[in-house]
Amino acid sequence: MKSNHTQALIIGAGIAGIAASIRLALKGYSVIVFEANTYPGGKLSEIHLGEYRFDAGPSLFTLPEQVDELFRLAGKNPEDYFEYEKLEVACNYFWEDGTTLKAYSDLNHFAEEVQTKLGEPASNIREALLKSAFIYDSLAPLFMNRSLHKISTWTNSQAMKSYLKMRKLGIFSTMNEANRKQFSHPKLVQLFNRYATYNGSNPFETPATLNIIPHLEFNIGAFFPKKGMHDITMSLFKLSEELGVNYHFGQKVEKVLVEGGKAIGIRVKDKDFHADLVTNNMDMVNAYKTILKEEKQPKLLLSQPKSSSALIFYWGIKREFQELDLHNILFSDNYPLEFEHIFKRGTIYEDPTIYLNITSTHKSDDAPGGCMNWFTMINVPNNQGQDWDKMIAEAKRNIIHKLNRILKTDLEALIEVEEILDPRSIESKTSSAQGALYGNSSNNKFAAFLRHANYSSSIKNLYFCGGSVHPGGGIPLCLLSAKIMSEMIDG
């Protein structure tokens, strides 16, 4: 149904803000987006260092239909804008003792790999992924596709069915407890525990409900955009402009204008812009501290502990490593202690788990011939005022030593270019509170209910989208937040 409103303003051109602009334009709104940075995409941007190109932020692509849907809604063929391929190997795994695993996208092939390398019965893998699919089928319609803040969500037939399955959905145990019951080999427990990091959580505290995530990667599939992850941003940005969306880059919003309990516009550089509705794609915590500081504060939500952050080294490597693929994990030998450092001590463990994302393995022009572009990341605490310069220097030494041991190389001699992203720069570049990647943490069973709604309960015509609000962080959930928000407007 076409809206009677005419003007919509969006604060932030992150991927959710761009998706929201498309959906609002298709509803008949005249849409203007204000972005403090000089480029679209937020975390989903890119970096060029000499002849090397890096996707700056999110590196795993799942649920591509969420992107395709936006093109189809606009009457476009998605393939005319955006192309991707399904990965044959979702991830390569390495341990210090020389054990390696390939997580094949073909379930039977992966199960056979695990049985051959670890002696874990293949049936345990199949059973675990059936359980993951069960959680997804039971909860996705409720938690991912609807607002949790509307009575209708809790009283529909799908919700009633979910209530009957509660004990089977992992709400009452931790991810680690569930995985220890499922698998006999500790390395496989560790592998499946790592999915907690996909939303910045601790597998030893977060509910086993998060075992929903492997379903996306294995049963549905992991994908790679043929032009890199940044093409998700640029293809949707192009579509939004074709639909008439107007962008103002380098324009930091100073205030949401509220009058008579309604959002009536925004203020940018002492100039007021008025509209029928305002959508905030800025991190929810920082939005209330800045552009909404004069309005009623959701104190409970603002006080929640934040998710983990990341330390990333973008390295141009003057050599190719045949054992490495697009996604690679080099595990810590003490996972519980690593997460204790991140979430309890606010420090970086000396033996961190390392994630290597190397897009030049699939997109050769991202690095010169015979070279690789290494996006080298470890999970770290959010910014609480630590001595980051000292921590980063120590972490870099430990990362290089670990990579040298496992890959049997001399990495320092191979690093041609370098750029660093840490929690401080994540916060300054993306306005993410404390540099947390996913907003509030999910380290308790009530976390899903402790995210901000996609609308304001106290200010009419003010809406929210992005990774810091419902349903959460990561590309698919950010896109769904825009969908939920847009469906509320006429509802």
Image (cartoon, rainbow, N blue to C red):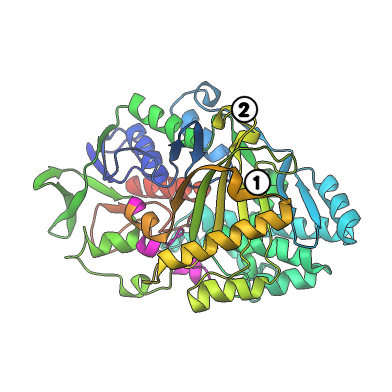
> What residue is shown at x 59% (from left), y 72% (from top)?
339
Which circle's residue, 2 or 1, is located before the other in the chain? Answer: 1
Residue under label 2, please give it: 369
Foreground mark, 2 or 1?
2
Dominant SS of magenta comes to loop
Can you give x and y, in whole percent of width and height, for residue 424 in the image?
A: 37, 60
Does 185 sit above or below residue 1? below
**How far apart are the alpha carbons under marks 2 and 1?**
20 Å
Task: Report the span colored magenta.
Answer: 429-452
Report the number of numbered marks. 2
Q: The disc labelled 2 sits on which kind of residue? A: Gly
Q: Residues within 10 Å of mark 1 (few under 14, many from 20)?
A: many
Can you give x and y, in whole percent of width and height, for residue 42 in the image?
A: 38, 45
Q: Is residue 452 visible?
A: no
- Residue 46 location, quadrant: top left
- Residue 176 location, quadrant: bottom right
State the residue in front, 289 or 353: 353
Q: Describe the element under mark 1 as helix, strand or loop.
A: strand
Residue under label 1, please give it: 327
Can you give x and y, in whole percent of width and height, for residue 27 in the image?
A: 34, 35
Q: Describe the element under mark 2 as helix, strand or loop.
A: loop
Please give left or right for residue 21 compared with residue 313 in the image: left
> What residue is shown at x 81% (from left), y 58% (from top)?
99
Residue 4 falls inside the magenta stretch? no
Q: The disc labelled 1 sits on which kind of residue? A: His
Q: Is residue 153 visible?
A: yes
